[in-house]
Amino acid sequence: MIRCHLARLMGERKMRISDVMRETGLSRTTVTLLYKETALKVDLEALDKLCDLFNCSLSDILEKMPSDSQR
Protein backbone atom coordinates (compact mmCIF):
# COMPACT_ATOMS: atom_id res chain seq x y z
CA MET A 1 0.00 0.00 0.00
CA ILE A 2 1.24 3.48 -0.87
CA ARG A 3 0.37 6.26 1.57
CA CYS A 4 0.21 9.88 0.47
CA HIS A 5 1.11 12.48 3.07
CA LEU A 6 -0.17 15.51 1.15
CA ALA A 7 -2.90 16.21 3.73
CA ARG A 8 -0.32 16.28 6.53
CA LEU A 9 2.03 18.54 4.57
CA MET A 10 -0.81 20.90 3.76
CA GLY A 11 -2.02 20.92 7.37
CA GLU A 12 1.44 21.76 8.69
CA ARG A 13 1.49 24.79 6.40
CA LYS A 14 -2.21 25.64 6.85
CA MET A 15 -2.78 25.30 3.12
CA ARG A 16 -6.06 24.56 1.39
CA ILE A 17 -6.59 22.59 -1.80
CA SER A 18 -7.12 25.87 -3.65
CA ASP A 19 -3.75 27.13 -2.37
CA VAL A 20 -1.97 24.06 -3.72
CA MET A 21 -3.82 24.38 -7.04
CA ARG A 22 -2.81 28.02 -7.40
CA GLU A 23 0.84 27.45 -6.47
CA THR A 24 1.38 24.34 -8.62
CA GLY A 25 -1.06 24.71 -11.50
CA LEU A 26 -2.42 21.23 -10.76
CA SER A 27 -6.13 20.54 -11.22
CA ARG A 28 -8.54 20.38 -8.30
CA THR A 29 -9.18 16.71 -9.14
CA THR A 30 -5.49 15.81 -8.94
CA VAL A 31 -4.93 17.60 -5.64
CA THR A 32 -8.16 16.27 -4.11
CA LEU A 33 -7.42 12.65 -5.08
CA LEU A 34 -3.96 12.88 -3.51
CA TYR A 35 -5.29 14.72 -0.45
CA LYS A 36 -7.94 12.05 0.16
CA GLU A 37 -5.54 9.21 -0.75
CA THR A 38 -7.93 7.92 -3.40
CA ALA A 39 -5.67 8.41 -6.43
CA LEU A 40 -4.98 5.22 -8.37
CA LYS A 41 -2.15 6.72 -10.40
CA VAL A 42 -0.09 9.89 -10.18
CA ASP A 43 1.65 11.89 -12.87
CA LEU A 44 5.39 12.38 -12.28
CA GLU A 45 5.09 16.06 -13.16
CA ALA A 46 2.47 16.48 -10.42
CA LEU A 47 4.78 14.87 -7.86
CA ASP A 48 7.64 17.09 -9.02
CA LYS A 49 5.51 20.21 -8.57
CA LEU A 50 4.44 19.11 -5.09
CA CYS A 51 8.06 18.42 -4.08
CA ASP A 52 9.00 21.91 -5.28
CA LEU A 53 6.07 23.53 -3.47
CA PHE A 54 6.78 21.84 -0.14
CA ASN A 55 10.56 21.87 -0.62
CA CYS A 56 10.69 18.18 0.20
CA SER A 57 11.71 14.86 -1.27
CA LEU A 58 9.38 12.36 -2.87
CA SER A 59 9.63 10.14 0.21
CA ASP A 60 8.08 12.96 2.27
CA ILE A 61 4.97 12.80 0.06
CA LEU A 62 4.69 9.08 -0.73
CA GLU A 63 5.49 6.17 1.55
CA LYS A 64 5.37 2.43 0.87
CA MET A 65 3.55 0.66 3.68
CA PRO A 66 3.29 -3.11 4.13
CA SER A 67 0.07 -4.44 2.66
CA ASP A 68 -2.27 -6.46 4.90
CA SER A 69 -1.15 -9.70 3.22
CA GLN A 70 2.49 -9.00 4.17
CA ARG A 71 1.87 -8.44 7.88
Image (cartoon, rainbow, N blue to C red):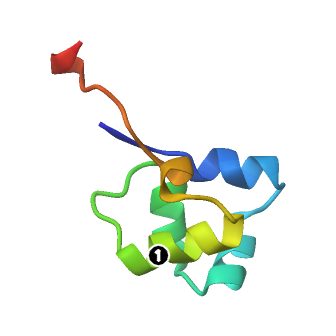
* Residue projecting furthest to the left: 69
**Amino acid at dot 1:** Ala
Q: Where is residue 45 in the image (x, y as percent from the top left)?
A: 43, 80
Where's residue 20, x and y in %?
68, 72
Q: Is residue 58 left or right of residue 16?
A: left
Mark 1: which secondary structure?
helix
Residue lying furthest front: 57
On-image quarter of the C terminus: top left
Percent of width and height locating residue 16: 75, 63
Q: Can residue 36 be seen in this view?
A: no
Which residue shows up at 37% across the image and 74% down it?
Answer: 44
Residue 57 location, quadrant: bottom right
Outermost residue on the top side: it is 71
Give the number of marks.
1
Quadrant housing the N terminus = top left
Residue beneath the point at 28% across and 63% down? 41
Q: How crowded is mark 1: few (under 14 residues within 10 Å), some or many (20 or more)?
A: some
Direction bottom: furthest residue: 25
Question: Residue 2's image quarter?
Answer: top left
Could you tell me residue 14's position as x and y percent?
A: 84, 55
Q: Mark 1 highlights which residue?
A: 46
Q: Can residue 62 be seen in this view?
A: yes
Q: Seen in the image, is 66 located left or right of residue 35?
A: left
Q: Is residue 61 above or below residue 8?
A: below
Residue drawn at point x = 38 percent, y = 51 percent:
38
